[in-house]
Image (spheres, rainbow, N blue to C red):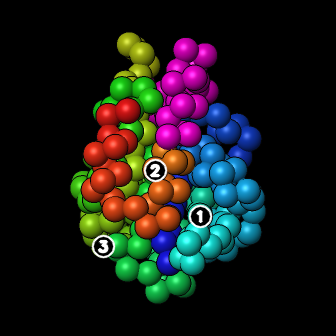
């Protein structure tokens, strides 16, 4: 089984914000798979799929960003997943808007949702898909920026990034080699 987690904040007030890039990526992936993410379990909205005979679990934690690890840990325990079975999609201010970066492991950086996941599952050794949102405008606090609505100039760049990210995740579900996907999608 492969667990694909998209990070974001629940509720309509956060729907199209920069911090919800993980949710928006999972929505794009679910659309390609032909269904929605609606089942409630382990503090998340989930959906189960089979791709090439492999079970895929999509999850959007509903705990708010800073407590994302609660849901990821609960799902990992429930389904007896190993760290190699987890991939997390999330926004990253250290990448330019719309740039993707797949990584096999790494530190959480300044991302509080990732920090909570690392703390709760006890490792940095899980896959991640970072979606660049760029730095906040001058004089804007980081917390205000990530919870602000995606700007009109950034919207087409991010929509394209969500589609590419969904393609990369779909290829991973189909058995593609992760390092090959890194070469194909990193930086674009």
Q: Which mark is residue 8?
A: none
Q: Is residue 185 magenta?
A: no
Measured from the top left, where is residue 123 in percent x and y?
28, 70
Identify the residue at horizontal 58%, vertical 69% (top origin).
51
The magenta segment is: 141-164
Instruction: Tell us which disc is closer to us: 2 or 1.
Output: 2
What residue would you read off at disc 2? 168
What residue would you read off at disc 1? 58
Indicate the quadrant where residue 133 lies. Answer: top left
Q: For the residue labelled by badge 3, is the local secondary structure a helix, a strand or a loop?
A: loop
Q: Main secondary structure of the magenta part?
A: helix
Q: Residues within 10 Å of mark 2 (few under 14, many from 20)?
A: many
What residue would you read off at disc 3? 122
Identify the residue at horizontal 38%, vertical 32% (top origin).
188
Question: Could you give the CA–CA distance between mark 3 and mark 2, rounded to whole angstroms?
Answer: 26 Å
Question: Could you give the CA–CA distance between mark 2 and mark 1, rounded to whole angstroms?
Answer: 14 Å
Comparing 136 with 131, the one in front is 131
Q: Tell me: 107 left or right of 121.
A: left
Q: Of the residues under marks 3 and 2, which one precedes in the sequence?
A: 3
Identify the residue at horizontal 56%, vertical 72% (top origin).
52
């Amino acid at each position: 089984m492969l667990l694909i987690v998209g990070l974001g904040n629940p509720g309509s007030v956060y729907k199209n914000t920069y911090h919800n890039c993980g949710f928006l990526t999972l929505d794009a992936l679910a659309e390609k798979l032909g269904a929605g993410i609606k089942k409630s379990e382990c503090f998340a909205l989930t959906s189960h799929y089979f791709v090439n005979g492999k079970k895929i679990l999509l999850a959007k934690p509903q705990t708010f960003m800073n407590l994302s690890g609660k849901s990821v840990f609960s799902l990992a325990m429930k389904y007896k997943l190993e760290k190699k079975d987890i991939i997390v999609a999330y926004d990253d201010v250290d990448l330019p808007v719309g740039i993707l970066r797949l990584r096999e492991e790494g530190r959480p950086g300044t991302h509080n949702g990732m920090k909570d996941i690392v703390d709760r599952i006890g490792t940095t050794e899980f896959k991640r898909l970072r979606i660049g949102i760029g730095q906040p405008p001058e004089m804007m606090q980081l917390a205000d920026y990530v919870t602000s609505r995606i700007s009109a100039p950034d919207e087409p760049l991010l929509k394209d990034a969500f589609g590419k990210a969904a393609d990369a995740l779909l290829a991973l579900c189909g058995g593609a080699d992760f390092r090959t996907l890194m070469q194909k999608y990193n930086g674009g």
